Amino acid sequence: MENRNKNKVFLDINNKKIDLPVLSGSTGPDVVDIRSFYKISNLFTFDPGFTSTASCESSITFIDGDKGKLLYRGFDIGELAVKSTFLEVCFLLLYGKLPQKNQLDDFTQRVTRHTMLHEQMIYFFRGFRRDAHPMAIICGVQGAMSSFYHDSLDINDPWQREVASIRMIAKLPTIVAYAYKYSTGQPFVYPNNSLDYAENFLYMCFSVPAEQYKSNPILNKAMDRIFILHADHEQNASTSTVRLAGSSGANPFACIAAGIACLWGPAHGGANEACLNMLKEIGSVDRIPDFIKRAKDKNDPFRLMGFGHRVYKNFDPRAKVMKESADEVLELLGISNNRTLQVAKELEKIALEDEYFIEKKLYPNVDFYSGIILEAMGFPTSMFTPIFALARTVGWISHWIEMHSDPDKKIGRPRQLYKGNLERPFVLIKDR
């Protein structure tokens, strides 16, 4: 609900006095309410990228970039990553509170019962080229879910929204694992509902029918933390895409497919993939000084990926916990024969000690450490963004549900500053 501050912003436009109310949230910067601005002034505001515009009210996630804080429903991300589980965080994001044990047990059972895909969906995977990027596959299969689950498409029915939400949280790990298996030429592995959420995902990715597979508890915990730390991140590009698609009344499966498509961009979800590609470009520890020198040169196009963050001006609060998991995984699996991980560890050491990085606060971020973990587990870089999408699905769904519960919901319709031609007469082709 809106909280109108006593303060107002006063503008003088063409000798016309305009006052706009200032709204206050529970924390964070106040916002100027410009909903009536065009009607009053006949002017639009200009904000490329919407970086200074609050597009909605939300009570899900809060980021304080200056202090390096990330809160899910008021709970610190570091505490959740250490003390909670991904499905418990899913419950928190969806319903706004931490579950009681019986509530979590019921929620877990509901998710677990929906992990399998409709058998006919397997044919969709066979329609893609063997070398198709996994993101292309999961985007297509996710969108196709709307053709199978007709009983959860009514966005105006809260129960159908609930069913669709559970289905997507349950089935995305299966879709992502099948996309991975398809790329390797190995047979699909059906989910095992006796396993935990993260453990089941690793089982579907790395198990083969010919021999028994058992994942290590350290790897299970690291994967669960990756899911938690990527579950939501306020009004980022993909979340805003889901909200924009949802504002038109599109079905939930299509809206999440839109979020997946947006996440695929290298400036967004592809950052951890770009980070590992950078490490492979460096190639060996002895070449690091040359690349550090290039990174400090403003005239050199080379940029170090995985350091600093657009939102966090101090440090990425997710990186501390992710570093702990990275250290545990690397200790378990060893890095002596992996040159990429050797480069990563040495680059991390330099970044934490070099005055240039410290002064500019270019600390390793969550993409840097998650990429290291996934590389060590054996995932190819093409799988990094699909795993990100799997984790972010619950955040997208939470925002989608919140949007449909907002009485002020309107279809998204950004404006523009038109710089094209004025009206011109049409000339027939014979006279041009």
Image: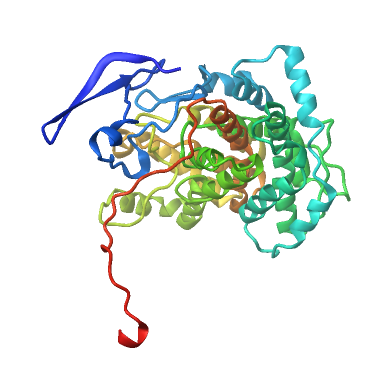
Q: How far from the left and from the top, in percent, is residue 96?
A: 59, 18
Q: How many marks?
A: 0
**295 over 312 or under it: above or below:** below
**81 over 392 or under it: above or below:** above
* Residue 346 appears in the rendering: yes
Apparent side of residue 44 relative to residue 286 in the rendered image (left or right): left
Colour convention of the picture:
rainbow
- Check the image and name the residue furthest to the left: 15
Apparent side of residue 322 relative to residue 305 in the rendered image (left or right): right
Residue at (50, 31) in percent of width and height: 409
Quadrant location of the C terminus? bottom left
Closer to the camera in the image, 164 or 233:
164
Closer to the camera in the image, 361 or 255:
255
Residue at (45, 36) in percent of width and height: 365
Closer to the camera in the image, 157 or 351:
157
- Check the image and name the residue furthest to the bottom: 430
Classify residue 174 by image quadrant.
top right
Q: How far from the left and from the top, in percent, is residue 298?
A: 26, 52
* Residue 368 appears in the rendering: no
Q: How far from the left and from the top, in percent, is residue 25?
A: 39, 18
- Check the image and name the residue furthest to the right: 210
**10 over 190 or under it: above or below:** above
Apparent side of residue 365 relative to residue 176 in the rendered image (left or right): left
Q: How far from the left and from the top, in percent, is residue 421?
A: 27, 64
Residue at (32, 30) in percent of width and height: 36
